[in-house]
Image (cartoon, grey):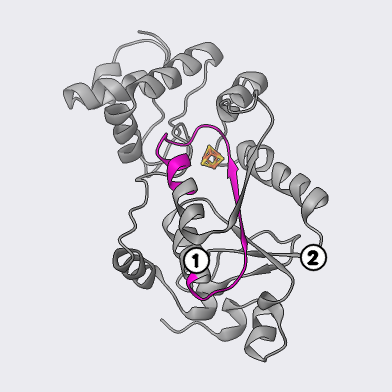
């Protein structure tokens, strides 16, 4: 797929290509989630001998293998790592769960408060305090031209500049023998697929059980309608995982969503 140049590079990147500095000037900070794209960007950027720092925002609800991966990539690149926490729970706590309990609300597609409260706000605070002269390097790829990064901050998209799509990212990581955690998003992300919920149930049953408990406490469900499926609770979904029987069949003739 060929993407028009003005859709894939920002003004700063165009400056770089025109030899006017842009992304190569000032202090560069890589927005580093620990996922495949930002990992490939960080490794390649350091391979090119370019200075940068890594900025990782944590909701405290990421799977346990994410933090060691983030540390490992920081060590491989030699870049200074900044980890920003949302500040809802105590340091090192689970900010997503604390936020849900405090707000008495699970995020939904339409009201995704978690992204602004747990990611953007802490990031903006960090920028106000430490971001003088900083340009953010985003790992958005060349094959996702419609996605945009933080609009209110100076930002560059090196993967787009290099023409890297998913195939190039995967080939590069394979060549570097780098494996990425299966999931870098929140374990209780309400926007994840049923397949990811199954993965959570099978690999982190204690977190799945916490999700069930939260649903019962606030009388709301993580599993909203998606792809034509109806809403159900995590407990009902667990029944389907365990028996293979669709929850709709079991629920026929039963009471409300949160009945046993
Ligand atoms: S991963 Fe999901 S739950 Fe976590 S901040 Fe993003 S949208 Fe919210």
Residue 63: say if magenta.
Answer: yes
Q: What residue is pinned by disc 1?
A: 41
Q: Residues within 10 Å of mark 2 (few under 14, many from 20)?
A: few
**Ligand 1 - quadrant of the structure image:** top right
Residue topped by disc 2: 133
Note whether ligand 1 is within 8 Å of mark 2: no
Q: Nearer the viewer, residue 188 or 83?
A: 83
Q: Residue at x 81, y 60 (%)?
A: 132
* Mark 2 secondary-structure assignment: loop
The residue furthest bottom is 18
Query: Residues in magenta?
Result: 47-70
Give whichever of 60, 210 is nearer the camera: 60
Residue 182, quarter of picture:
top left
Is residue 104 covered in magenta?
A: no
In this picture, residue 43 sits left or right of residue 251? right
> Can residue 154 be spotted in the picture?
yes
Q: Which mark is residue 13?
A: none
Q: Is residue 59 above or below residue 81?
A: above
Compute the Cα span from label 2 to label 1: 21 Å
User: Percent x, y for residue 103?
Assistant: 66, 23
**106 to 215, vertically: above or below:** below
Whether residue 233 appears in this view of the structure is no
Q: Position of residue 77 (x, y in %)?
A: 50, 61
Badge 1: how crowded within 10 Å, few (<14), some, or many (20+)?
many
**Where does the N terminus fall, quadrant-wise?**
bottom left
| 171 on left or right of 75 | left
Q: Position of residue 56 (x, y in %)?
A: 58, 48
Residue 101 drawn at (x, y percent):
61, 19
Quarter occupied by residue 63: top left
């Amino acid at each position: 797929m060929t993407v028009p140049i003005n859709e894939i590079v920002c003004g700063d990147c165009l400056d770089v290509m025109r030899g006017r500095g842009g992304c190569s000037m000032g202090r560069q900070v890589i927005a580093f989630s620990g996922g495949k794209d930002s990992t490939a960007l960080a490794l390649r950027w350091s391979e090119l001998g370019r200075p940068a720092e890594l900025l990782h925002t944590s909701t405290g609800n990421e799977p346990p293998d994410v933090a060691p991966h983030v540390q490992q990539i920081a060590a491989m690149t030699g870049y200074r790592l900044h980890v920003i926490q949302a500040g809802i729970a105590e340091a090192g706590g689970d900010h997503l769960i604390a936020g849900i309990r405090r707000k008495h609300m699970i995020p939904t597609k339409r009201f995704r408060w978690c992204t602004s409260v747990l990611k953007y706000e802490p990031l903006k605070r960090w920028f106000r305090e430490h971001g003088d002269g900083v340009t953010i390097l985003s790992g958005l790829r060349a094959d996702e031209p419609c996605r945009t990064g933080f609009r209110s901050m100076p930002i560059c998209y090196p993967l787009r500049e290099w023409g890297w799509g998913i195939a190039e990212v995967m080939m590069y990581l394979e060549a570097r023998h780098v494996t990425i955690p299966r999931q870098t998003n929140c374990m209780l992300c309400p926007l994840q697929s049923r397949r990811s919920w199954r993965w959570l149930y099978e690999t982190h049953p204690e977190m799945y059980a916490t999700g069930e408990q939260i649903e019962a406490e606030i009388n709301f469900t993580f599993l909203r309608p998606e792809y034509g499926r109806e809403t159900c609770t995590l407990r009902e979904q667990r029944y389907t995982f365990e028996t293979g029987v669709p929850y709709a069949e079991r629920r026929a003739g039963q009471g409300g969503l949160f009945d046993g």
